[in-house]
Image (tube, rainbow, N blue to C red):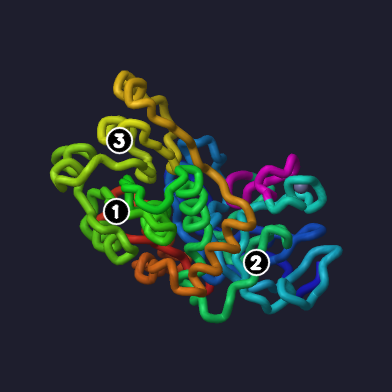
Amino acid sequence: MTGDVTGTMRAAVLAGERLVVSETSQPVPGPGQLLVRVRLAGIAATDLAAAATGIPDGTVLGHELVGDVVGVGGGIAVGGLLGIGRRVVALPVQSCGACAACLGGDPVHCPMARIVGTGPGATGAFAELVAVSRHAALPVPDDVPDDLAVLVEPLAGALRAVRRAGVGTGDRVLVLGAGAVGLGAAAWARAVGARDVVVSDPLAVRRDLALACGATAAVDPTTNGTAGAYRALGRKRPTVVVECSGTDEALAGAIDVLGRGGRLVVASLHTGSVRLSLRAAHFKELTVAFSAWYEVDDFARTLEALAGGTLPVAGVVTHVVGLDDLPGAFTALRNPTDQGKVVVDPGR
Ligand SMILES: [Zn+2]
């Protein structure tokens, strides 16, 4: 490796349902990898679900990141667009860099891929340093600030979901859940020409963020459920539902509220089994798809949109905490009150 970083670092590691801050070994970038000093890392719903999805204790979580290249592994030039000193975002993956998936811009589906922040061997971004593959990293334009760059991963996931739903001009879109992916789905849906974008979320702060991100209305599903809250608006049925809430009620609500021939894309992780009545889905001839990943091009298009000002997501990051305050912030997000996106600044 080339760079000036060796030894140990501070990181937040998974301990049951919680995080604890401890001193751990620094990742050493392998061939084709960059060592990145984390500027900001976002807390995602999948991090909160880590224990439920079988991620072992001791794992350093965190897969939404922006940071500076401080070291490079073998086979990489020290300088250049992704050289030492560059500010980058990256798909959270360490992969081979040589297979068809890697060369095609889809490193997540490399047979050798290890997803950063989800298990042993590929430590995550809730740490001072993280190693990512160079071919999964992109330089951040100077006019995209850190608190937007840290959103690129969920926004790229949202772009993928909106694409998989085939959202286009004239669509009426209902987005369930206004976390970063849901807010991104609302912003992308407007950007690609959706006529109407309604966002449903129980938190007032997130409904306000949805409106700021381009939603034409925001509703609270708490009292009458998703479908009831949508119907109360008096609008035509949605043509598309993007499920970003992770709640089972949302899936049933989506089937209920969609019109004939509607499309449902499930972009959030549902960790358990779900019982759904499919009679309505059958007779409405709904299309259901899932969306979990992204490619390098999704990141590139997201950075372009952020630099060009076409994704109005400023303000989505509402809280920045240091590493010492991350465990408390992580636990608090299980019952959020006033939080939009919460990010950690490990250098704080
Ligand atoms: Zn590969």
Secondary structure of the residue carrying tag 2 is: strand
The three-letter amino acid code for the residue at tag 2 is Leu
- The reply to whether discs 3 and 1 touch (Cβ–Cβ < 8 Å) is no
Q: Residue at x 47, y 35 (%)?
A: 289
- On the image, numbered disc 2 is attached to which residue? 138
Sequence-wise, the earlier of marks 3 and 1 is 1
As measured in the structure, the alpha-carbon distance from the residue carrying label 1 to the one carrying label 2 is 32 Å
- On the image, numbered disc 3 is attached to which residue? 258
In the image, residue 258 sits, relative to residue 121, either above or below, namely above
The three-letter amino acid code for the residue at tag 1 is Asp
Q: Which residues are magenta?
A: 106-119
The N terminus appears in which quarter of the rendering? bottom right
Instruction: Decide if residue 284 is in sight here.
Output: yes
Secondary structure of the residue carrying tag 3 is: loop
Horizontally, residue 272 falls left or right of residue 131, namely: left
**Could you tell me what secondary structure mostly forms the magenta stretch?**
loop
The three-letter amino acid code for the residue at tag 3 is Leu
- On the image, numbered disc 1 is attached to which residue? 196
In the image, residue 2 sits, relative to residue 133, either above or below, namely below
Q: Position of residue 178 (x, y in %)?
A: 33, 53
Among the 4 quarters of the image, the one containing residue 38: bottom right
